Amino acid sequence: MTMDRETDRLIREWLLDGPSAAPPDLLASAFSEIPAMNARRGGLAGTRSFLMLRRFTGVAASAVAIVAVVALAAFMLPRAFPPGNSIGGSVTTPTPSYTPTDTPLPTIGPMGLCDASNLVAAITSWTGAAGSRIAEVSLHNTGLSTCETPALDQAQLLGPDGSILIGGSPTSSPAQLVMSPDAILRTMIRVSDYCGPAVTSGPVTVAFLLGNGAGRVVANPWNPTDLSGVPPCNSAPGTPGSIEMQPWTP
Amino acid sequence: MYRDLLDEAQHGSGEAFGMLVAGSVDRCYAIAYRILRDAERAHDSVQEALVGAWIDLPSLRDPARFEAWLTRLVVNACYTEARRERRWQTKLRLLPVENPVSPDTTGAVADRDELERAFGRLTVEQRTVVVLHYFGGQSSEEIASMLRIPAGTVRSRLHHAMRQLRAAVESDGRAVPKRGDRSA
């Protein structure tokens, strides 16, 4: 490569002139995220994974002193979420099944039901990791009053025509979400091992099923042509993929 | 020792994972900071990469590739962060400065300022290869292997990025003699 040495030197110096060490709280904050994420994966991955993650939180705290306080706090918080909240599923043959988001919600309490048209879900990012894709999803109550909605804890990965690429299984312990006006809840969806028919055009997105067949809330895709959410196939064609989600958190 | 740690971490030992990443987190952060030029975003990116590393560690087949694998996770997290940043930037509007400050006449400072701005104009993919090559000291082949892209792509990104950076420095007037490259 033709390269001016003086420019080369300047750029090297400029690049070196920056932090060479991570902030002291970085490991702590990262570790605090891990049990929260994985405690909720436990239901799908099995009790063993969940227990390992609990062990991880405690032991990591002893390995890195600065981690201790934050990790402990994070260790306590996820216990509010039962491990059974994770969702697993299998690949299904794409079937056009796009359900509008304005399905009336079932009655669940005196507070008042959320009007589905006021609930706006959106994918805010896709992150690629080895063998899987992770979506950050927000759920915004654009309504003017506090309302309740079923937990929306059964997830699906949807193809561009609304077909289900990977479907999650229903959970046996549905909770309810209470959303104040303008509240935003967030979750992370992890999809892995899609071995179904090729998806060549976007966008792909995720949906969350309401209980009792009452419809689903479809997240706005990350962008109109986005294919980031199609995970690679690491198994034989037709092998079930998986989709997991965290519980919704503010 | 290292392989034992990795093996234990792959089998769910949080202690081993903590020790592994504690040895890498400074380098990861330094790379993320230089790609994103923002401490908070670098922090978030490394955090995201570490979470992803814990989740996907069991799928890592070649223990010798742990560092490269972790760096790739960091780079991918930086890509995501940069895309997020770009979406915000499209909503920004530049306002005129009413009382502009006199420019610093010190050559080195001006050069750095030009570099900073020119670097910000590069794509995140170009910034990444510049950082990995000039800061991380990795060859085009090593970067290609790490990022799973062709070596030619790495060289091309590096070439175009350097051309833009050099043009920025040279346009400042103190520069550096040209050797045939056109300004971008």
Image: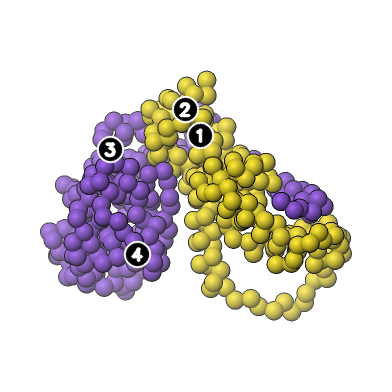
Chain colours: A purple, B yellow
- The answer to whether marks 4 and 2 mark residues whose Cβ atoms lie closer than 8 Å is no
What distance separates the C-alpha of mark 4 from that of mark 3?
Answer: 31 Å
What distance separates the C-alpha of mark 2 from that of mark 3?
Answer: 21 Å
Q: Kindly identify which numbered label has been placed on residue A201.
A: 4
The residue carrying mark 1 is B66
Kind of residue sitting beneath label 3: Ala
The residue carrying mark 2 is B6
Q: Chain under label 2?
A: B
Q: Chain under label 3?
A: A
Could you tell me residue A186's position as x and y percent?
A: 36, 57
The numbered mark, 4 or 3, whose residue comes first in the sequence reads 3
Front in this rendered view, residue B74 or A18: B74
Tell which tag, 2 or 3, sits nearer the viewer.
Answer: 2
Q: Residue at x 30, y 56 (%)?
A: A198
Task: Give the secondary structure at mark 1.
Answer: helix
Residue B143's place in the image compared with A113, above or below, is above
Residue A102's place in the image compared with B59, above or below, is below
Task: Give the secondary structure at mark 3.
Answer: helix
Q: Are marks 4 and 1 on the same chain?
A: no
Tell which tag, 4 or 1, sits nearer the viewer.
Answer: 4
Front in this rendered view, residue B87 or A103: B87
Q: Are marks 3 and 1 on the same chain?
A: no
- The answer to whether marks 1 and 2 mark residues whose Cβ atoms lie closer than 8 Å is yes
- The answer to whether marks 4 and 3 mark residues whose Cβ atoms lie closer than 8 Å is no
The residue carrying mark 3 is A45
Q: Say whether residue B42 is left or right of residue B116.
A: left
Q: Quadrant of residue A42?
A: top left
Q: Residue at x 54, y 35 (%)?
A: B67
Q: Quadrant of residue B112?
A: bottom right
Kind of residue sitting beneath label 1: Phe
Could you tell me residue B138's position as x and y percent?
A: 64, 41
